[in-house]
């Protein structure tokens, strides 16, 4: 039995993914989550073989959720499910521990193959991801063209969602002092001086829905 958890903040997407997956004999959808924190909690409770995880989740984005799921459940594979396939996003996915990447536009053609591959602990990628890109990533390691780290982006998203430092600390399993440090570092890196400016940055860069 292949156990699968679906995490996406749109009901219609979750229903569509479930409908495709449940056509397969021996596959069971053990849960659905609408935000990253719920995805992590449900993964810990149900211990699925594969998590189909939207990148743009509220509360805890797909990269942060992936990092925590893989750290706590190393036997669980993560398939990042997204509308975007930039090189930066692909690199963040790999660094977080996901071994699958599927564009939502490719779901009908490739979702079953992607889950089959991950259930066998083999990688699966579509879109612009090529062997050359993977080889470049492996050769260059953590070289980055992004001024912000994945964790800093997760903090910005939560700030933009109106979370307090205490709530952010609880969601990301870090201390409030660390949250404050991340906030100060981000403001410095982006040359911003107010939370309002930080929120505008988050919206403009699609770290949070407007």
Image (spheres, grey):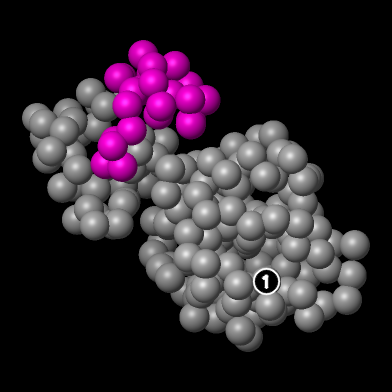
Question: Does the stretch in magenta take in 114?
Answer: no
Q: Residues within 10 Å of mark 1 (few under 14, many from 20)?
A: some
Residue 103's place in the image compared with 175, above or below, is below
Q: What secondary structure predominates along the stretch shown in magenta?
A: helix
Quadrant position of the N terminus in the picture: bottom right
Residue depicted at 19% across the width and 43% down the height: 199
User: Does the rendering let one see residue 131?
Assistant: no
Question: Does the stretch in magenta take in 163?
Answer: yes
The residue closer to the viewer here, 170 or 192, is: 170
Instruction: Quadrant for residue 182, please give it.
Output: top left
Residue depicted at 16% across the width and 33% down the height: 195
In percent of width and height, residue 152 lies at 35, 35
Instruction: Give the extent of the magenta segment.
Output: 159-181
Residue depicted at 82% across the width and 77% down the height: 24
Element carrying mark 1: helix
Residue 16's place in the image compared with 30, above or below, is below
Instruction: Quadrant for residue 149, please give it.
Output: top left
- Name the residue tied to disc 1: 18
């Amino acid at each position: 039995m292949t156990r699968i958890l679906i995490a996406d903040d749109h009901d219609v997407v979750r229903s569509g993914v479930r409908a495709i997956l449940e056509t397969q004999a021996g596959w069971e959808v053990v849960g659905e989550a609408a935000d990253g924190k719920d995805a992590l909690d449900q993964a810990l409770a149900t211990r699925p073989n594969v998590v189909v995880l939207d990148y743009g989740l509220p509360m805890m984005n797909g990269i942060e959720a992936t990092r925590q799921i893989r750290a706590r459940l190393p036997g669980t594979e993560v398939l990042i499910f997204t509308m975007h396939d930039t090189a930066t996003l692909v690199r963040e996915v790999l660094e977080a521990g996901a071994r699958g990447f599927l564009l939502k536009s490719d779901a009908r053609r490739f979702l079953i193959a992607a889950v089959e591959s991950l259930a066998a602990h083999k990688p699966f990628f579509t879109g612009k991801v090529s062997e050359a890109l993977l080889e470049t990533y492996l050769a260059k390691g953590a070289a980055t063209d992004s001024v912000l780290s994945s964790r800093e982006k997760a903090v910005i998203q939560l700030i933009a969602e109106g979370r307090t430092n205490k709530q952010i600390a609880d969601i990301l399993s870090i201390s409030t002092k660390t949250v404050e440090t991340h906030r100060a570092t981000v403001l410095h890196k982006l040359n911003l001086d107010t939370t309002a400016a930080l929120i505008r940055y988050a919206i403009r860069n699609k770290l949070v829905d407007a």
